[in-house]
Image: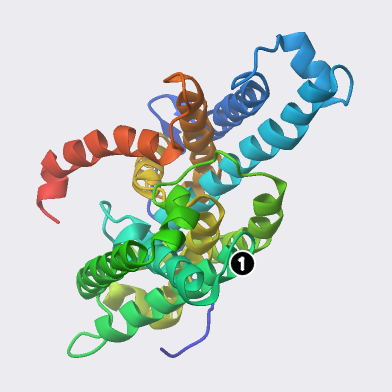
Amino acid sequence: MTGTLNAPGPSTAPASPQRRGGVTRSAVTFGLLAVLVLLLLLGLFIGSGDFTISQAWNALWGNGDPTTVTIIRNDRIPRTLLAALVGVALGVAGAVMQGITRNPLADPGILGVNAGAYFAMVLGSVAFGAAGADYTWWALAGAFGAAVLVYFVGSRGLGGASPAKLVLTGVAVASILSGTAFALTMIHPKSFDAIRGLLIGTLDGRGWDQLKLAWIPVLVGLVLALALVGYLNALALGDDRAAALGVPVGTVRTAGFVSLTVLCGAATAAIGPITFVGLMVPHAVRMFVGPDNRWVIPVSMCVGPIVMVGSDLIARVATSSELPVGMVTAFLGAPLLIWLARRETGAQL
């Protein structure tokens, strides 16, 4: 890993049209922002508790029945905001992951980041009695540890840290860590009871504490990801061409790993592992704005929370008892993965 980050020239950006199907990218972005605002508002009015819209609106400002005020201000508001924050983190992490590996089917989970975060949370609970806010730091440490391990192992041998080697190494590491975490929870039933809510991502019971702990690492990861957008466009041309353009490929790929590790670690610490969001969001974005990462990553910051908040709303009303939001994203994402794998472009990867 050598070199410094010097912005590549404008020729490194893919030549993607400003209009997609007769609709400008700006119009798409503003439309998505409107959908996001609508979903955030719906998050205040949909859920457990038989409240009218007027009661929920008054409770938002601290007026009305104390029970209603407590539910709206201490449950629905932080839960909805946390869903949006996690959506931003996973959407951008997926876009960065696909950019640095040049693999449109890549998901942050295949690098072992989510598995590392969950394994560390289980280890902290079993060995050190970690609970509550402690999980955030354990998850971040586990995510970083898994990413470093994957990068170290995947960069050995000829070719260095090629995308294919990193993906294969990540899958192997994720399998080992997931299996070990499951074994630890079986051996220590008390720890399993304490952490079983995080086996699959859930927003039930999450509130201001998780939101306060997660937003700073997410912000750090976003800043780093946005700083890489031009370099990811260069990487799309291939490592050799990117290097010929003066892009420090190793530095950019490492910075991308750091960014998606922080984002996934914070998201997993907040609500548990969430699947397929990092895969779905960048694909949906490219359908509307093209492959230019100068658009893909910022717009993913909008589509990610749309997917997460929308999934949470479905989880609230799908059954008489709320579903974990991770089940909803898996239900939505699995058919998408099958469809993508059957496409000709997916078959050629």
Q: Is residue 89 above or below residue 168?
A: above
Q: What's the amino acid at mark 1?
A: Asp
**Would you identify the image quadrant in which residue 176 lies?**
bottom left
Q: Which residue is mark 1?
A: 134
> Residue at (78%, 13%) from the top-left corner?
55
Q: Residues within 10 Å of mark 1 (few under 14, many from 20)?
A: some
Q: Residue 31 in the image: state x and y as whole percent.
A: 56, 26
Q: Residue 57 in the image: state x and y as whole percent.
A: 78, 17
* Left or right: residue 132 compared with residue 276: right
* Left or right: residue 212 compared with residue 63: left
* Left or right: residue 20 compared with residue 208: left
> Residue at (50%, 72%) from the top-left corner?
124
**Any part of residue 17 in sight:** no
Q: Residue 12 in the image: state x and y as whole percent.
A: 41, 64
- Location of the C terminus by quadrant is bottom left
> Residue at (34%, 66%) from the top-left corner?
181
